[in-house]
Image (tube, rainbow, N blue to C red):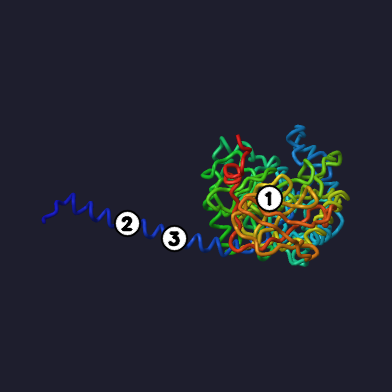
Amino acid sequence: MELSRRDYLGLLGAGASAAMTAAGAAGAAEGDADRERRMRWWHEARFGMFVHWGLYSVRGRHEWAMENEAVPVDEYAQLARRFTPKPNAARAWAKLAKQAGQKYMVMTTKHHEGFCLFNSKYTSYCAPKQACGRDLVREYVDAARAEGLRVGFYYSLMDWHHPDGARCAQDEAARRRFVDYIHGQIRELLTNYGKIDILWYDVAWPLDPAGWESEKMNRMVFQLQPDIIVNNRNKLPGDFSTPEQHITAEKGGRAWETCMTMNDSWGYQRADDDWKSPKTVVRNLITCSRDGGNFLFNIGPRGDGSIPEESVRILTAVGQWMDRNSSTIYGSDPCRVRTSVYSNFTRKGNTLYQHVHFWPGSPVIVAGLQTRVKSARLLASGQPVKFQQDHLRVQFLNLPEKAPDEPVTTLAIECEGEPVQDMNMVRTQRKRERA
């Protein structure tokens, strides 16, 4: 059969398209495999410490006070003369993080106020060139590594101090200067401190990804730090999503990390007394782990670097719970058992962990469990727990009237297969009263 020139070119085009599609699929598969490699430790870790620290910590009126109170740039900059934290304050943060069971830290190297905690050749508005006289990022990195914690850098793209930080949206020359400044500082951060595990971008206002040259930005990041992971806040997907102040799992198995404050402020605010209880923190950590996510929990040190006493109290209590229960969090698998009025759940393989936050006494019940239970025990003590199971529920019996562990008691339930719950079956098959 003879082919016309158009048919021939069409076949060539189809072949090239197929080749490009195959190459794209291979590249995507290679990218997915590399991401899995880079993020393996992060998925295992589950729990990290966020640290918000800067000039706003001296002022003690919230990290957004410069904008929300319309403080003039020159007036705000005077805080740099008073920002003289005690040397190596980060050692106490890292020790507290380790004690709390947190496996990694992320610290603000530059927040929206524009003040850099690292030494930068691009600006004098940085801690080493102001009253502090020290590289606070170096102190943080050394402290985290001394405790065996992974190191993350937060870096705000938005900048309230830089003269081009707003006008870059309308002025191309300003955009060029500002983007070069931002890229240059990111290069400094990822060049001068050894291996960095996380880059946590924030607030891409006022530019879009093309304006920020975000693709170029990320290429530079991975060239400098091949093992790093990056978030999605430079308006590219990155390696993980970042729900803030709420726990919402990503669809399709995408990695995610909820970041949350200990009260209502990220930075130190002396008047903010709306502290979360240790029970609330533990419950949030469990929910993130249940749905396959991480929990990045914040502290806001004072201007001198000291940690507010309430933050220490809360994280110490969480750490005591983690001493007994961390095996239910680290490396946990997504869990399909979810429904209870007094419990939450995590899972590892075929082991279901029932975390009872409102202890009802005996019995403790899981309704709709479709998987046969082999054994059960109280996790903290290892004490075996008797149980009865039928097609509608499993009851754990002879339990003490007072909760055996605080602030949440965990039952370890060994199942014959992956635990699955069907509450619709309970609703439809439970016997009704005869008419």
Tell me: 326 left or right of 58.
Answer: left
What type is the residue that disc 3 sits on? Gly
Q: CA distance from mark 3 to mark 1?
A: 34 Å
Using the image, determine if residue 41 lies above or below residue 54.
below
Residue at horizontal 84%, vertical 45%? 58
- Residue 78 place in picture, x, y as percent: 82, 42
- The residue wearing badge 2 is 18
Q: Residue furthest front?
A: 435
| Residue 411: quarter of image | bottom right
Between 196 and 70, the residue placed more toward the observer is 196
Between 332 and 44, the residue placed more toward the observer is 332
Between 134 and 242, the residue placed more toward the observer is 242
Residue at horizontal 14%, vertical 51%? 4
Q: Secondary structure at mark 2?
A: helix
What type is the residue that disc 1 sits on? Thr
**Nearer mark to the viewer, of 3 and 1:** 1
- The residue wearing badge 3 is 27
Tell me: 111 left or right of 19.
Answer: right
Please state the total of marks drawn on the protein image. 3
Instruction: Please rate how many residues cluster around mark 1, counting C-alpha atoms within 10 Å: few if below 14, some from 14 to 19, many from 20.
Output: many
**Nearer mark to the viewer, of 1 and 2:** 1
Residue 287 image label: 1
Disc 3 + disc 1, Cβ < 8 Å: no
What type is the residue that disc 2 sits on? Ala
- Residue 433 place in picture, x, y as percent: 63, 38
- Residue 135 place in picture, x, y as percent: 77, 58
Instruction: Please rate how many residues cluster around mark 3, counting C-alpha atoms within 10 Å: few if below 14, some from 14 to 19, many from 20.
Output: few
